[in-house]
Amino acid sequence: MDAISLFYLIIGILVFDFILDQLLGYLNYTWYSKDVPQELNDVYDADEYAKSQEYKKTNYRFSVLSSSISFIAIMIFLFYDGFAIIDTWARTLVNHDILVGLLFFTVIAAAGEIISLPFSYYSTFVIEEKFGFNKTTTKTFIIDKIKGWLLTAILGGGILSLVIVCYDWAGANFWWYVWILIFTISLLMNMFYARWFVPLFNKQTPLEEGTLKTSIGNYAQGVGFQLDKIFVIDGSKRSTKANAYFSGFGSEKRVTLYDTLISKL
């Protein structure tokens, strides 16, 4: 396959993915105006249900705008040789493969962040605030962003450097080594996500002894799920939404409950 055919194949895949995503989003959107089924009238409060549907509609319209702008930006970047321009520029500043790769992806990531940052801010401080969910302060928002950038730079930069080393060392078979590398890193990140990364953004404390912990432990034992780590996370410092999740495996397996979930339910 020649370069031109490959280029338009990539464009076709991106266009198809965008259209499919928008179509599926719209199909979901058409259900947001429907009434509560008769069988559930005694479950949902009518006003709360209407508010939740309006929240979904607002987020859908906002996602259409943000995803459309991102898609247009990518198309402009591709058709006007943006990647080639950045690559050429990077090679005028450094001549080592790893440094060229790091500089190239730093520019790409920075451009993406510049485009997405206003949408992230609007989503947090306008939409979430409007519907009474937001508890994030401007300070927390900025600190979260800085931590995220640093984590991306350190972790992403390290992985990218190893990928380039594999490519230079292994040649045509480099993808085998990269697959093993990514698999190993993914395994470690899934296992130690709660121990290594969550504390950078949130405070976790073991769930105190009591009926809740006992009930969860009894249920886990009843379904054959070995569980001895149950934590509470301070999700309330960013949102009033309730949540919970599983993470890790083996000795690092745990359940984490948001403090909002405990206080509301």
Image (tube, helix red, strand yellow):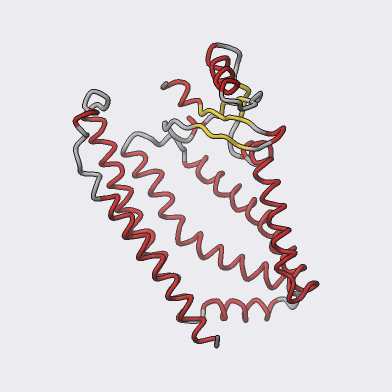
Does 251 sit left or right of 239 as displayed? right
Residue at position x 29%, y 37% in the image: 52
Residue at position x 47%, y 35% in the image: 238
Vertical order, 150 against 78 (above or below): above
User: Could you say which is closer to the camera, residue 168 or residue 37?
Assistant: 37
Does 25 sit left or right of 45 as displayed? right
Vertical order, 259 against 123 (above or below): above
Does 184 sit left or right of 114 as displayed? right
Give the x, y percent position of residue 250.
Answer: 70, 35
User: Could you say which is closer to the camera, residue 136 or residue 231?
Assistant: 231
Would you identify the image quadrant in which residue 211 lies? top right
Would you identify the image quadrant in which residue 19 lies? bottom left
Residue at position x 73%, y 58% in the image: 181
Residue at position x 72%, y 70% in the image: 99
Give the x, y percent position of residue 64.
Answer: 33, 58
Does 24 sit left or right of 38 as displayed? right
